[in-house]
């Protein structure tokens, strides 16, 4: 059975290690597997997220420039956002506008590729990786319109190629991935989901990720900062999920109560309410216990020290040791 090596989370790597030029090969490997072509990052431009771990646990992003002159937005989104698609559109539009100086020809508009690594369910679908872009198709034939541009051929003369100027969007639904490895990209998504690299993985640069993102490479101070970040991400995600569930339960209870009030006998109503309250209280206690175990499991998967997990969740170290990470 293949063995695995524990790595740091990819969002933390984006905030720290992968901003260093010496580690661009890890990003190049991931992007090449996703886009199906050799990608070489030239420089990190900027990002909306702050490099400090105390800011924006929900989202981490990075804007890079590759050797083909394209701008690539790489984003890790940890929890649901109601207007997520709208923000994606705004983000790519903003990059286009900011990279076209006032008065310049539209022909200098840059190509933008947006890559979203999602740790929540977005929409309804039967795949875990989606690609989207703008194309024009005939209303009657359904055929795509091919608009071409003239280029100077390397050997002289003129060549033509299709214009592909509209932004491209890639959505990676990490939690929908079923751990079946079919290609190089699946090895990287396995890394995103489990923060590990199996020793039988062969995707180009996946070995670099195993080497450079290893937890064991961290200093004691780096490890403390990383563990604080992971705790914050996991707890914030749990608080968001709890608030959502509590809101649903509250709305459901209120609606049901209104229905009961119409024509129900007071004695039956009181009995039902009492029984419902007792059942709800028992369920709430069990639910909170499962939440604590869920947080502990996520922290354990991310390599956080058992003593810190015990402080964060209130579980004993013995209880934490019994929790499976798979």
Image (spheres, helix red, strand yellow):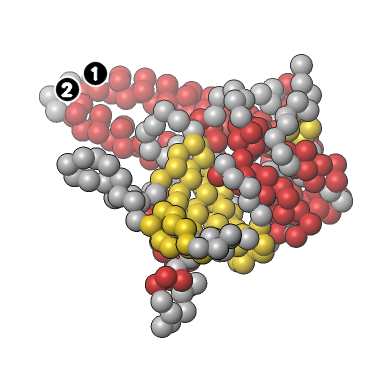
Give the residue pinned by disc 2. 264
**Residue 104 image point, x, y percent:** 43, 79
Quadrant for the N terminus in the image: top right
Question: Residue at point 31% right, 37% down?
Answer: 251
**Residue pictured at 30% horizontal, 50% vertical:** 145
The image shows residue 188, relative to residue 287, as above or below, that is below
Q: Circle 2: is it few (<14), some (14-19), or many (20+) Cα within 10 Å?
A: few
Q: Are marks 2 and 1 in contact (CB under 8 Å)?
A: yes
x and y percentages locating residue 285 in the rendered image: 53, 28
Q: Secondary structure at mark 2?
A: loop
Between 287 and 34, the one lying in front of the other is 34
Q: With respect to residue 288, does 208 lie above or below? A: below
**Near-viewer residue (59 or 242):** 59
Q: Which residue does the numbered mark 1 point to in the structure image?
A: 268
Asked whether, in this view, residue 152 is left or right of residue 224, the answer is left
- Report how far apart the C-alphas of labels 2 and 1 lie in the structure: 7 Å
């Amino acid at each position: 059975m293949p063995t695995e090596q524990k790595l740091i989370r990819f969002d933390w790597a984006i905030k720290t290690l992968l901003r260093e030029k010496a580690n661009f090969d890890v990003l190049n490997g991931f992007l090449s597997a996703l886009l199906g072509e050799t990608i070489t990052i030239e420089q990190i431009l900027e990002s909306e997220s702050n490099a400090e771990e105390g800011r924006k646990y929900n989202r981490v992003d990075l804007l890079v420039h590759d050797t083909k002159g394209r701008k690539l937005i790489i984003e890790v989104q940890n929890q649901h956002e109601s207007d997520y698609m709208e923000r994606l559109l705004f983000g790519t539009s903003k990059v286009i506008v900011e990279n076209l100086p006032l008065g310049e020809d539209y022909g200098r508009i840059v190509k933008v590729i947006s890559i979203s690594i999602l740790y929540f369910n977005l929409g309804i679908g039967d795949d875990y990786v989606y690609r989207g872009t703008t194309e024009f198709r005939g209303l009657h034939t359904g055929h795509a319109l091919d608009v071409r541009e003239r280029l100077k051929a390397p050997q002289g003369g003129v060549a033509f190629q299709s214009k592909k100027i509209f932004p491209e969007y890639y959505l990676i639904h990490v939690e929908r991935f079923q751990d079946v490895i079919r290609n190089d990209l699946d090895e990287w998504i396995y890394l995103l989901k489990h923060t590990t690299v199996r020793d039988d993985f062969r995707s180009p640069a996946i070995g670099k990720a195993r080497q450079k993102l290893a937890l064991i490479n961290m200093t004691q101070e780096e490890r403390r900062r990383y563990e604080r970040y992971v705790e914050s991400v996991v707890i914030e995600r749990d608080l968001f999920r709890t608030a959502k569930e509590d809101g649903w339960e509250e709305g459901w209870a209120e609606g049901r109560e209104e229905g009961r009030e119409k024509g129900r006998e007071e004695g039956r109503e009181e009995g039902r309410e009492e029984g419902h309250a007792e059942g709800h209280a028992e369920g709430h206690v069990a639910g909170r216990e499962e939440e604590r175990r869920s947080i502990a499991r996520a922290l354990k998967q991310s390599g956080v020290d058992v003593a810190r997990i015990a402080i964060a969740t209130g579980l004993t170290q013995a209880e934490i040791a019994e929790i499976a990470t798979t």
